[in-house]
Image: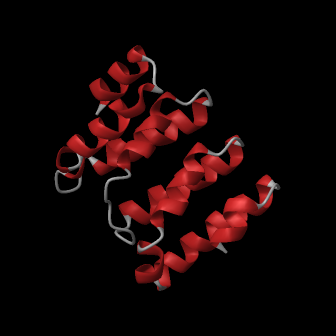
Amino acid sequence: LITIMERSPDATVRSNAVIALGDMAVCFNHLIDENTDFLYRRLADNDASVKRTCLMTLTFLILAGQVKVKGQLGEMAKCLEDEDRRIADLARMFFTELSTKDNAVYNHFVDMFSLLSAGGRMEEESFKRIIRFL
């Protein structure tokens, strides 16, 4: 399923694979927990519908406590500056909800900051807006 999600040229197939992995995570989270990096990679998909599906799936899994948050929250933070307004709004909603749970944003802030500042692929103004929001 992960291979299909990674390699399929069809955006619908990639979206459906993300949903399937999300469903599997509810029942078999130990299997998905080891492979969450593959899910987070779909946040950088070229197709907005795949990106949106992935963000919605991860939002549900994280807020429901089905997936443990590790160092990948920075990938979700990048979505705050997505050119698709719906993706950016969904990311805002996610971080707003996450901020109400056990200092999760605070506890992972350094990891997010590191990921966002690494590589120089992000414009400085976008970086500032994301950090200010977080």
Q: Residue at x 45, y 18 (%)?
A: 123
Residue 66 occupies quadrant: bottom left
Instruction: Reply above or below: 34 against 126.
Output: below
Q: Quadrant of the N terminus?
A: bottom right
Residue 3 occupies quadrant: bottom right
Of all residues shown, which one is farthest toward the front?
119
Residue 111 percent coordinates (x, y): 26, 45
Q: Which residue is drawn at 63% across and 64% down?
A: 18
Of all residues shown, which one is farthest toward the right?
10
Of all residues shown, which one is farthest toward the bottom?
27
Q: Which of 97 and 21 is in front in this view?
A: 21
Q: Residue at x 55, y 70 (%)?
A: 22
Let me know if residue 84 appears in the view: yes
Q: How many labels does the image show?
A: 0
Q: In this rendering, would 41 be left or right of 96? A: right
Q: Nearer the viewer, residue 113 or 118?
A: 118
Q: Nearer the viewer, residue 129 or 72?
A: 72
Residue 75 percent coordinates (x, y): 44, 44
Instruction: Reply above or below: 100 against 2.
Output: above
Q: Residue at x 41, y 31 (%)?
A: 119
Let me know if residue 93 appears in the view: no
Which scheme is used to colour this image of the protein?
Answer: secondary structure
Residue 92 percent coordinates (x, y): 42, 37
Residue 58 percent coordinates (x, y): 48, 58
Q: In which quarter of the image is the C terminus?
A: top left
Q: Which of 69 and 34 is in front in this view?
A: 34
